[in-house]
Amino acid sequence: MKLHTAKPLTQPSSFLPFLRPSPRLHRHLSSTTTAQIPPPTPFVPDSKTFLSLIGRNLSAHAAKIPTWTALFTLSSEQLRKLGVEPARTRRYLLWWRERFRKGDYGIGGDMKEVRGSVATVRAVEVVPAGAAGPAAAAATTTTRRRKIVVNVPVGAEEEVDEVRLRGLEPVKGLKVLGAGTVAGPFVEPVKGTGGSVAAVRAQEGMWEQRRGVKIDGGERRKVMVRRKRKLEEMKKARV
């Protein structure tokens, strides 16, 4: 009787390129950690300010998340071990972390002229983008000019020249009311400016998303709660 020896299973050579990570994938994996950490902004220069801005008492955990890198790399499990409780607080922190990573800031997050956690904003009228020559001259009328709120250097209460205004972007979340009053949340008008100049100061809970109020026990329990209430009302009606 002739015995047949089993041959070891081998992958065809044509499949080998698919089993090896490509150089492009290797570079992507090695740079993923760095890419996930966004740079600080002038309004949010460190992790302590970030935790203070988003509220829900997360500033109490600032000592546990001391660096900007830790803020954007710690996992939910690592945050739990550090004592960031309850779970909904960790979810809230991770949610805000993703928003910041995508450039979706709260009030003041897009401001570049900041000194000591304070930004100055001013209500101005600007010429429509692309207007030049006769079009720019026609835009001097109030019907063609646009009123916006811009971030100016701290202490610049005087008029900002027209050329410089053309390169400024409107501050998100703020608007101009009436003739030229800066309006919006956390706006502190500067005295003597008639409301046309204001300060925006980084403070606790400035970006906080308030938790909703549960009605009839919330979505999961409202059917049961309302049914019990109806039964109680029916019992009282019978008496």
Image: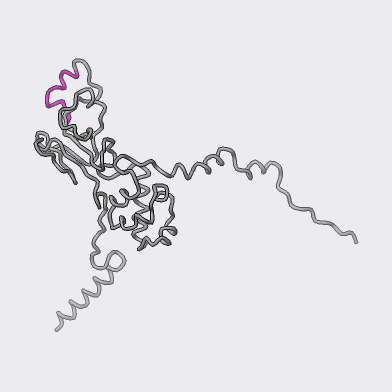
> Which quarter of the figure has residue 167?
top left
Q: Nearer the viewer, residue 112 or 88?
A: 112
Q: Per the image, is 138 magenta?
A: yes
Residue at 34% in and 59% down: 89
Q: Nearer the viewer, residue 61 or 8?
A: 61
On screen, residue 172 above or below 124 = below
The image position of residue 43, as x and y in percent, is 29, 42
On screen, residue 158 above or below 34 = above
Q: Which residues are magenta?
A: 135-146
Q: Considering the image in quadrants, where does the N terminus appear?
A: bottom right
The image position of residue 30, as x and y in percent, is 53, 43
The image position of residue 114, as x and y in percent, is 26, 38
Q: Per the image, is 149 magenta?
A: no
Q: Considering the image in quadrants, where does the C terminus appear?
A: bottom left
User: Farthest top residue?
Assistant: 133
Residue at 14% in and 22% down: 140
Q: Nearer the viewer, residue 75 or 49?
A: 49
Residue at 23% in and 39% down: 119
> Which quarter of the figure has residue 14?
top right
Q: Is residue 233 left or right of residue 81?
A: left
Q: Is residue 13 left or right of residue 190?
A: right
Q: Is residue 42 left or right of residue 124?
A: right
The image position of residue 22, as x and y in percent, is 59, 40
Residue at 16% in and 22% down: 139
Q: Nearer the viewer, residue 213 or 114?
A: 114
